[in-house]
Image: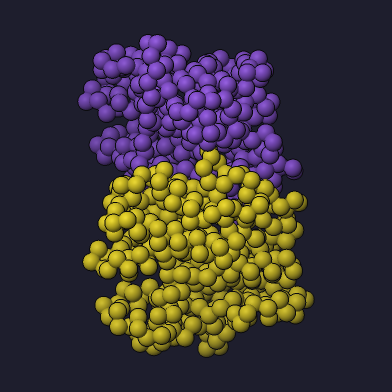
Chain colours: A purple, B yellow
C-alpha cells in the first residue's frame, strides 16, 4: 500500500471490508453483524436496551490534523480519535450502569484522507472495543467536503431496576467521584500552548494530554455500582464536575453542595494551574471531558459502595459533597458558600 | 422569536428542550427518553434488536441551502431533510422485516444556523416519526464549522426466524420490487437543471423531486413480508435496483437475472429520460435513493407473497427477474443478455 493512498482510491465497499477484517467474527450475541441493511443483536433476557449516541467533530472536539506533521504522528492522532469516539459513548453506558453490548460507527471523511489514517482510526476503535468487549456491528462511511465527523452509537444492557438514572438522587445522598479531575482540560490547554512540544515531554503534562486524547470510560465502575445497587444516581463528567452535580441535582429535584477542599485534582492539572497562576480547583470543577463518574450514594449504602469501589484496581473514589433539601448548587470554598460555577459549554 | 435567531443564541440545552417539547411523552416501551446519559428501551420479549445508522451530509447527499432563497423555502428544505434522515434508516429496518422501536438523531450544525430551520428539520423528523410510531429517544447536537450532518440510528424489533437477511436467497427465487423506479434520480437531475424552477411545476417532475426529498420508507411492506415469511431475502434500493440485485445475489452465493422490460419505471423518470434522450431503464436500474424494497420470493411462496402485497394500499409490486444457479448478475434487454450495470456510487 502506498502511504499516500486515499480513502477515495478504495471506495466505501473496500473500506468496510477492511473494517470487517480488523474486527473479526463477532461474539455469539451478535445474530447478524456488518454487511446487511441493519445489524441484529440479541437482547439479554429480561434486561432493557440502553442506547446512546455521541459525536466528535474536527475543529470543535479535536484540533484539525497538522498537514506538516509526520505520518506516524498523524496516524497516532487518528488512532486516539477512534479510541475516544467509542470511549465517550461507553462512558454514557457506564453512567447508566449498563454493560456494553454493541456499537455502530458513522464516519464522514474527506475523499483525500489517507487510508493509513483510516486504518489507524479503526485500530484505535478496535483496541478499546476488544478491551470492553463491545463488538462493532454496523455503521456508515460517507465522504464529506467538511471536517472529519465521528458518530458512535453504543448499545448496552441492564436490568430495569438496576439502571442508574440522573433523577433518582435524594437529599442527604453523598456525592462520590472517581479518579482525579482537570487532567483533560489541562491537556487541551497544554496542546494549545506555543510550547506544547516541550511541555508535552514533562510526565505530568503528557498524562494530561493522554487523558484528553484517550479517556478511559469507567465501564466496570458503573456496571458494578449499578448491579450492586449502591448508588441512587450517576452521571459521567463529560462537561465537568460542576455541570454533573447541577444535572443530578436538577433532575432529582434537590440542591447540592460541593466542598472545594475535597475535590480530587489531578497532579498534572495542579502543575498546569500553578504555572498559569490560576486556581486548580477551577480546572477540576469546570474542565470538561474527564469522563469520570459521579455517584449519588445514600448514607445507608455508603459502606457497600466503598466496598465495591475498593475493587476498582486503585482508581481513587472521593466524597466531594452531598445532595441537599435546600435548592441551588453551591460550592464551599475557604469556609464560604458561593454558587457552583457553570460547566464546560460545548456548543 | 426573531426570524434571524441562530442556534448559537439558544445553546444546546435549549435546543434539546425544544426538541423534547416537539415530541411529547414517549410510548410505554420507552423506559427512559431524552435527558439522561443514555435512553432505555424495553425490547419485545423473545425478539431481536435490529439496529442501523445512516448519515446525510450537506454537499454530498443534498445540495447546500441557497442563501438567497426565501425563508419559507429554506425551512421546507430543512423539513424535508429531517424527514429523509429518518426515512433512510427506517428503510433499512423495513428491509430486515423489523418494526421500528426508537430512533436517535445526531446533528452537526453551524452556529449561525437559523433556529427556524432547526425547528423545521425537527418537525419533518417528528411527522414521519409519528406516522411510523418511532419515538425519538436521544441523540446529540453539536456545532460544526462544516456542512450540516444528520446521523440517524434506528432501532427495530423482529423475531430471529423472521428477519429478512440479504444472504438467504436461493437460486430460482423470483425478484419482486415495490413501487416504480428512477423517480428520485430524475428528481436530482431536475433540481440540477438550470430550468429547475419551471420544470418543477410539471406534475411528473414535481413528484420526482418529492421522491428525492421525502422518500417513503416501506416499513409496513417489509414488516408484513417478514412476519408472513413470504420472502427469503430482502434489501432496500438505497443505491439502485442493479446494486440491490447484485448485493442479494452475492450475499446469497447465487447469480441473478433482471428482465429490462419488466422493470417498473416511474412516469416522471420516463418523461425526464425522453427529454434528455436517454434510456429510462438506466435511471430505474442505476438511480439511487428510491428506497423501495427488493424481495427474493421462493416460487412456492409466490401466491402468499402476492396476497400480502395486495394489502399494500395500491403500491405496485412487480416481478423483475430471478436468482439463478449460474453465477453473475445479468440484464436481459431486447432478447440479449448483458452484464447488469453497476449501481449508484455514494463515495
Q: In which quarter of the image is the C terminus of chain B?
A: bottom left
* Foreground residue among A31 and A221: A221
Note whether A25 is above or below A240 in the view shown: below
**Residue appearing at x 31%, y 73% in the figure:** B192
Residue A53 located left or right of residue A311: left
Q: In which quarter of the image is the N terminus of chain B?
A: bottom left
Note whether B63 is above or below B41 in the view shown: below
Q: In which quarter of the image is residue B206?
A: bottom left
The answer to whether residue B133 is visible is yes
**Residue appearing at x 67%, y 33% in the figure:** A162
* Foreground residue among B75 and B273: B75
Residue A43 located left or right of residue B287: right
Q: Across the whole image, how many numbered discs are drawn on residues? A: 0
* Foreground residue among B240 and A342: A342
The answer to whether residue A24 is visible is no
The image shows residue A256 at horizontal and vertical percentages of 49, 25
Note whether A139 is above or below B179 in the view shown: above
The image shows residue B340 at horizontal and vertical percentages of 52, 74
The image shows residue A160 at horizontal and vertical percentages of 68, 39
Residue B309 located left or right of residue A290: right
**Residue appearing at x 39%, y 88% in the figure:** B274
Amino acid at each position: 500500500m502506498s502511504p499516500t493512498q486515499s480513502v477515495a482510491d478504495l471506495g466505501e465497499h473496500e473500506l468496510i471490508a477492511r473494517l470487517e477484517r480488523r474486527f473479526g467474527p463477532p461474539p455469539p450475541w451478535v445474530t447478524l453483524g456488518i454487511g446487511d441493511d441493519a445489524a441484529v443483536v440479541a437482547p439479554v433476557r429480561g434486561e432493557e436496551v440502553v442506547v446512546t449516541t455521541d459525536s466528535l467533530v474536527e475543529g470543535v472536539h479535536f484540533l484539525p490534523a497538522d498537514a506538516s506533521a509526520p505520518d506516524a504522528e498523524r496516524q497516532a492522532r487518528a488512532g486516539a480519535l477512534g479510541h475516544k469516539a467509542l470511549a465517550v459513548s461507553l462512558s454514557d453506558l457506564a453512567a447508566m450502569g449498563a454493560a456494553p453490548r454493541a456499537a455502530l460507527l458513522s464516519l464522514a471523511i474527506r475523499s483525500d484522507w489517507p487510508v493509513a489514517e483510516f486504518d489507524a482510526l479503526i485500530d484505535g476503535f478496535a483496541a478499546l472495543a476488544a478491551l470492553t468487549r463491545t463488538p462493532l456491528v454496523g455503521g456508515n462511511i460517507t465522504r464529506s467536503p467538511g471536517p472529519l465527523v465521528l458518530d458512535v452509537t453504543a448499545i448496552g444492557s441492564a436490568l430495569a431496576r438496576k439502571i442508574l438514572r440522573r433523577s433518582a438522587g435524594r437529599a442527604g445522598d453523598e456525592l462520590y467521584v472517581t479518579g482525579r479531575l482537570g487532567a483533560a482540560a489541562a491537556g487541551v490547554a497544554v496542546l494549545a500552548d506555543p510550547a506544547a512540544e516541550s511541555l508535552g515531554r514533562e510526565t505530568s503534562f503528557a498524562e494530561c494530554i493522554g487523558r484528553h486524547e484517550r479517556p478511559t470510560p469507567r465501564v466496570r465502575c458503573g456496571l458494578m455500582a449499578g448491579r450492586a445497587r449502591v448508588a441512587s444516581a450517576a452521571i459521567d463528567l463529560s462537561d465537568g464536575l460542576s455541570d454533573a452535580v447541577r444535572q443530578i441535582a436538577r433532575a432529582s429535584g434537590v440542591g447540592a453542595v460541593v466542598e472545594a477542599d475535597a475535590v480530587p485534582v489531578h497532579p498534572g492539572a495542579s502543575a498546569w494551574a500553578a504555572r498559569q497562576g490560576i486556581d486548580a480547583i477551577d480546572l477540576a470543577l469546570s474542565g470538561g471531558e474527564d469522563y469520570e463518574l459521579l455517584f449519588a450514594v445514600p448514607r445507608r449504602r455508603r459502606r457497600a459502595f466503598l466496598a465495591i469501589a475498593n475493587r476498582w484496581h486503585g482508581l481513587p473514589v472521593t466524597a466531594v459533597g452531598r445532595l441537599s433539601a435546600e435548592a441551588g448548587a453551591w460550592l464551599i470554598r475557604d469556609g464560604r458558600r458561593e454558587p457552583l460555577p457553570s460547566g464546560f459549554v460545548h456548543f
